[in-house]
Each structure stands twice: as C-alpha cells, then as structure tokens.
Amino acid sequence: APAGTAGPSLVEPVLVGHRGASGYRPEHTLAAYELAIEQGADFIEPDLVSTRDGVLVARHENEIGGTTDVADHPEYAGRRTTKVIEGSPVTGWFTEDFTYKELRTLRAKERLPQVRPDNTAYDGQERIPTLDEVIKLARREGVGIYPETKHPTYFDSIGLSLEEPLVAALRKRHWADADDPVIIQSFEVSNLRRLDAMVDVPLAQLVDAAGGPADLPGTTYASMVTPAGLATIATYADGLGAAKNLVLPRDAAGRTGAPSSVVPDAHAVGLVVHVWTLRRENQFMATNFRIGTDPNAPGDLAAEARAFLDAGVDGVFSDNPDVVAGVMDKT
Ligand code: G3P
Ligand code: CA
C-alpha cells in the first residue's frame, strides 16, 4: 500500500466486523461497515456476489428477498423465480438477474427482524454497496477488507466469474499486493486455487463444522482440518477461517471443553486461524447457554471472545465488534 495508508497489523489477533457491525445495522451496508470501524474492527467483511453486468456487490446471498425491499417493487415482480444453488432449490430474486443500475434502486433491510428488532429502524435507508465502495471506505478509514466469494462455482456456471472482477477491483485501488490489508476467503477450494495464481494477497480457506466444500463432492471439512488436510490448504492459502465449534468443541449441553488441536495443527503448517462467528445471540460460553430459548439474552460474549483468544486464534469475526474490541483492547 502507498505510504500513509498502511492497514491493520496481521500479527496481533485481528477483529473482523462480520458483514459490518451486523448485530446493530442491516448487514452489508455502508452504515454497518462504518459502525464496525468505529467500534474497533481491523477488517470489514463483504460477502460478494455478482450482478448481471458483472459488478461485485456486498450481499450474503445472491437471493436478496430477505435483505432488501425488492418485494415492494412491482416492476421486479416478474423476476421472482426458483433456482437450484449448490443442490438446493432457492426461491426469490437473484442479483445475477439485475443490472447494477437496477440494484441501486433497492434498499437494504434487516435479515433477522425477530432476532434484531432494533436494526429494523434502519430498514429502507441504505443501498447495496459495491465492492469498490467498500474498498474506498476501508482505505479512507485505515482498516482492511476481508472479502468472501459466495458460490463462485455457481457464478462460473452462468458465465459470471467472481475472480476476475475481484482482482480487478483490488488492482484498481492498488490493494493487490501481499502486504496490503486484504484477505480473501472462500469455502470453495477451486476458487482459492485460482485466486492464488492470480493475486498475491493472503487467502483463507473457510471450513464449516459439518459438510464439505461445494466444489469438491466427497471431500469433507473434517478431513480438511486433519494435519494432512491443513498441509494441503497451506499449499494455496495462508489462513484457515474456522467455524468456532472446530476450535472449541461443544458438548450436548452447549458447554465448551478443552480446545481441539486445530489451532496448533494449523500453526504448525504456517496457517493463521480466524474463527467465526462471535455474536451476541449465540454465546455458548455463557454459564446459562441458551440457544433456542431467548435469542436476545445478553449472555457473555466477552467471555466467549476471551476463550477463543486463550485457545490461540489469530483473529475472530464478530457481529458485535464493540464487545469483542473491549476484550482485545482495541477500543
Ligand atoms: O467468513 C466467516 C463467515 O462469514 C462464513 O460464513 O455464512 O457468515 O458468510 P457466513
Ligand atoms: Ca462471510
């Protein structure tokens, strides 16, 4: 990065604003990202999907019925459809059926109004940001970005590669070097391997607590976090983005015990480990762990964050960066 625009340290444990400060604002909006930065995030996380004309925009899914007001636009009623995405039927409106100009007419809304009722106060105010807008915000504010490619094989299959526009967007803003504050993450191995050949920024392989990568039927995430699997990941990536249960396994009552060997095993092959997702509604370190009862119970997210830092992780993704920043001494 040019002098004076150096981003956050990648050495100290890093705090990633997951979809922005999505615990407090509708996710993947500039307002959510700005708040995450205010609250101490080192990185902001845009999930990326494509428009019909190849513009990368920040949405968790290409289906946007739950996170925008598209259903309130009669002019787009005819675009509601059902598609099979990664083997599952999905019904709604899809970013790849809209030009960027059309998407700009929509406004974001809270995905989980029952869980995060306060966030609905911000419904209808924010546009869907482009990757370029997110990069510009991060550069201006001196934080990094942690983009995730969503369904890259699916997008390839409809002629809308995510890789080329992602790399082009980074190059356009001179954020494509190994020491720039950018980490690209994906669940899909082939996507990361292609990116590894295209760009020097660090890459992180996402691994879930169950299942396997959509582009490699038969491969399981469980096999990917064995020492041999981690050594393979280290041939094309620099980090492991681990579902938190992989690092701190839970018992049937939701209590955590000793950390697994995933962190030391990943470190042994040179991978940093970033865990997701620390959120107020899902605080399994609370003494009275209570998923499925009161989703708004405050619990003890700070204790959860401390437990992961004690387990040796190099970073955490959080929907509530303010709480975690307090624990990490970033405020
Ligand atoms: O990168 C960690 C996490 O963001 C992956 O899951 O569904 O929140 O995008 P998701
Ligand atoms: Ca994500």
Image (cartoon, helix red, strand yellow):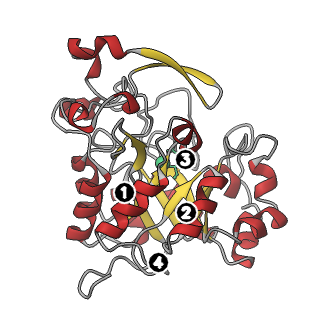
Q: How many marks?
A: 4
Q: Nearer the viewer, residue 90 or 310?
A: 90
> Can you say which quadrant of the picture contains the N terminus?
bottom left
Q: Which class describes the residues within 10 Å of circle 3: few (<14), some (14-19), or many (20+)? A: some
Q: Which residue is mark 2?
A: 195
| Residue under label 1 | 321
- Mark 4 lies on residue: 10
Q: Amino acid at mark 3?
A: Ala
Amino acid carrying mark 2 in the image: Leu
Q: Which mark is residue 125?
A: none
Is the C-beta of the residue carrying label 4 under 8 Å from the nearest atom of ligand 1?
Answer: no
Between 306 and 66, the one nearer to me in the picture? 66
The residue most toward the bottom is 3
Q: Is residue 101 above or below residue 66?
A: below
Most extreme residue toward the front is: 159
Q: Examine the rendering and report whether any part of residue 307 can be seen.
A: no
Sequence-wise, which precedes: disc 3 or disc 2?
2
Secondary element type, mark 1: helix
- Residue 132 place in picture, x, y as percent: 28, 57
